Amino acid sequence: MRVAYYPGCSLEGTAIEYDASSKAMCEALGIELVEVPDWSCCGASSAHFVNHDLAVALGARNLALAQGTGAEQVTAPCAACYARLKFAEHKLGEEPERLGRMLERGGVDYPGGMKVASLLETVVCDYGLDAVKERMTRSLNGLKVACYYGCLLVRPTGMPGFDDPENPRSLDNLMVALGAEPVEWPYRIECCGGGLALGRADIVRKLVGDLLDEAVAAGAECFVVACPLCQGNLDWRQTEAAAERARQYNLPVYYFTQLVGWCCGAPPHKLGIELLMTPATSLLERQLAGSQV
Amino acid sequence: MPRVGVFICQCGTNIAKTVDTAKVAAEAGKLPFVAHSDTYVYMCSSAGQQKIEDAIREHKLDSIVVSACTPQMHQKTFEGCADRAGLNRYMSTLANIREQCSYVHKDGELATQKALELTAMAVAKAARDEPLFQSEAPINRKALIVGGGVAGIQAALDIAEAGYEVVVVEKSPSIGGRMSQFDKTFPTLDCSACILTPKMVEAYQNPNIRLLTYSEVAEIGGFVGNFNVKIRKRARSVDEVKCTGCGTCWEKCPQKKIPSEYDEQLGPRTAIYVPFPQAVPLVPVIDREHCTKFLKDRCGLCQKVCPADAVDYTQEDEIIEDTFGAVVVATGFDVWDHTDYGEYGAGKIPDVVSGIQFERMLNLSGPTHGKVLRPSDGKEAKTVVFVQCAGSRDDQHGYSYCSKVCCMYTAKHAILLREKCPDAEAYVFYIDIRATGKGYEEFIRDAQRKYGAQYIRGRVSRMFQHGDKVRVFGVDTLGGGQVKIDADLVVLATAIEPRDDAKALSQLLGIGCDNNGFFNEAHPKLAPVDTMSAGIYIAGAAQFARDIPDTVAMASATAAKVVGLFSKEKLLSEPSVATCDLNLCSGCMACHVTCPYDAIEMTEYNDRAARLTRMVASVNENLCHGCGACSGTCRSGAMTLRAFTDNQIEAQIEALCEFVPAK
């Protein structure tokens, strides 16, 4: 399986462990990633606040480059990148003439037709859970995980997505395949605070605190996510949120790529688990010890 | 040569503001066959009609053309003019220069030209009109009513009162329908059962009414005045004549935990059961899918304890055949299944119920004996959130239409909650309040002011189980803020939707459904209880979401239609139907395949010229709607639609071509 890989800006900065674990996981699964050459901004954040057409154009530029790799789908680990690329593809289909003229002026030649997938979708829907199971060398052994989808991964509802926007299950199903026990908790698509991470830390602390409380109440030992912003907010603000509520959480926030990689024989040092803020290695070691008993 | 009169209507300014009617009248006067041409402000007014009648007599006209609105509106009006002036009523043609011309065009000059061309085509047809005569058919003066809810009962009582026989076919074991499930009715808060049960008993006792409960329409054929119907009377496993309704059987039945349909799955029933204490007839049925006797050939307790020896396990479905003159379809509604609503828990949160479930909870004979208890743990609900428009006015889930009754019944629920439990809190999320009936607005005000229901304008975004509460997230668009309520119970005002078998029934009856699956009326304003099939009428929520007063009014309207039909001596059928030239017909039966009304069958024809007997097509004029599909299909030109013959249509095309400039 050969897939064009669009890392996006977060994976080069705040979420290098997501980039590393995505590559390590895909290598372990036998998914060949071809990095989109000369990729640029996906059109998120500043771009689509300033100009909607510009945001589409940026997405289209990356889609054109991805198409140039000869792969049939482009996969993006970041939920925001995924959403922007998907939206660009969708919008170009809606207004082909006007947006086509705009791309022409910008020298972008993109006829459309690139399948845009989030990396979670690539693994769960295209690669398949059965294939994942075949590659497993160890299991998560009943680890209680809170699957947290956040906002962008399964939205907006108007666009054809890969999971139910109101009751998503893909991450849960993947965790079950890995031998974990996803907890039933109601906040799986509530807001993490998103882009307010730096500007309004007070709001993020409140939202993250709610998420932590709910996950703990449901019996979760850790989170699993598929978005660098979700991971960041839950992980970095966890001690602050804990202090604000005068309690202790210590819930590791894993990327799903780290857990899949860990189960499917990717070299542990390539998964960046030790780079997470909340100590995350000991929990996995405990699970491993449990499975050997 | 036939003498044709042309009458151009101005329709006030509806036509005249775009079309130069004087010019059309003048130009039409020069057309072949036209002996008289005139224009008038309202041709359909009595003065206008008089003008036409006078002109027919004065100018010795053979046929008339009225260029005005759609034939659906005034064909019959102008046929009447011809008739009164001594012409055959079918020697009249309408050219539609309003809906198909002045309403849709802006350029006056072009519109005037088009109006003239349409008129010229009508003249070409009118000059070739032949007198047509209506045929007669007898009427079977017995009505079939499908559905025994309040609509069916009301229609049955009204028709029976007029002295005609009625058969009511009801799918469930008792008549009463949805209304029998309700606790109180808005806006008067009178007890639903108290006003309905007398009508149910009256229907049961009326000698002109026969109730067939636990029955379905299996087949229907024929036409207005003569519908041949097969009714499947499902095996009740209890002899209706012997049974006294004493209740021993259902008290003793050991299968006590079957979810009750009547209580909307909130309470149990037995395998041999009557759906509710006031059921009519008070004769139980055995639910064979849950009865131990039928599943495992054990038990048999009900038969042993029955003092009247009425339980009969060997009963089989029975097919009753009968002929009816008219059919009233009053099959009612379902409520939308909120398991589609992921935001609202996808039906998995036990303390999120539908409005009709809450209705059962409020009822003294319901599963909670009138107490508002949480289904999850049976504790009393102190905080109740009502969510309106669950599945209505929502393109993403459910339906785009407004279900019409939810604002009112939610206000009723809030009032009843506060009455039963004064320390309970009632929150109502709404988009708009639609309370457009007598006493309705005042009722909503009462809910808000007298009973203190808290109305929050805004939608609920999500709800989920949170501990033993249901956490509800919503928005208050008037106050401008997010709302979070931890509720004991959430009541969704789920959309009113058609019965799941409405589509199948519509196909059986040959009446259409709209996009949402409700039965189509013949005209949304002027024929709201008629259907496109003569002799079949619709009442109540089978046509669209309706409250009880509207439903009862509609039911009486259908009864008036049926009684009107039955009061005729004979049925006159429209003569503008298809006819087959047997000499030309090759018997290929392509017409039979095309006919949407199943009006064409194969018959033997003794062809004397060819000295053989062969199969040909034959049209049942009572079933034919005159759509013309067969004449368009017929390869040998044998099928002709009277008043729209090939000859006439060709003449119309030629008339139009006269206006096309030669190249």
Image (tube, grey):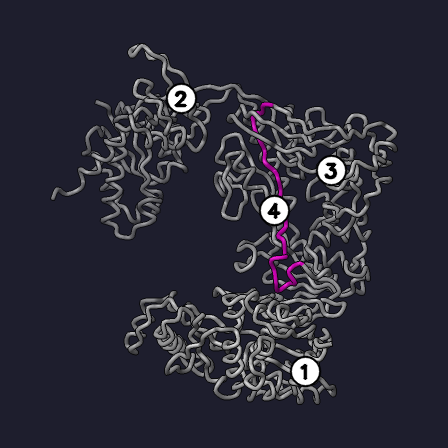
Q: In the rendering, at what x and y percent does residue B173 appear? A: 72, 36
The chain that hosts pointer 1 is A
Going from N to C along the chain, the mark reached first, 3 or 2, is 3
Mark 4 closeness class: few <14, some 14–19, many ≥20 residues within 10 Å: many
- Marks 4 and 3 belong to one chain: yes
Q: Secondary structure at mark 1?
A: helix
Q: What residue did someone put label 2 on?
A: B618
Q: In the rendering, at what x and y percent does residue B285 appear? A: 76, 35
Q: What residue did someone put label 1 on?
A: A285
The label on residue B288 is: 3
Q: In the rendering, at what x and y percent does residue B411 appear? A: 69, 57
Amino acid marked by disc 3? Arg
Label 4 to label 1: alpha-carbon separation: 64 Å
**Residues rendered magenta in the picture:** B322-347
The chain that hosts pointer 2 is B
Q: Is residue B524 magenta?
A: no
Q: What residue did someone put label 4 on?
A: B546
The label on residue B399 is: none
* Residue shown at the point (43%, 33%) measured from the top left: B596
Label 3 to label 2: alpha-carbon separation: 46 Å
Vertical arrangement, residue B127 with respect to residue A98, above or below: above
Q: In the rendering, at what x and y percent does residue A195 appear? A: 53, 83
Label 1 to label 2: alpha-carbon separation: 85 Å
Amino acid marked by disc 2? Ser
Q: Quadrant of residue B317?
A: top right
Mark 3 closeness class: few <14, some 14–19, many ≥20 residues within 10 Å: some
Label 1 to label 3: alpha-carbon separation: 57 Å
Q: Nearer the viewer, mark 4 or mark 3?
A: 3
Q: Nearer the viewer, mark 1 or mark 2?
A: 1
Going from N to C along the chain, the mark reached first, 2 or 4, is 4
Q: Is residue B150 visible?
A: yes
* Residue shown at the point (58%, 79%) measured from the top left: A258
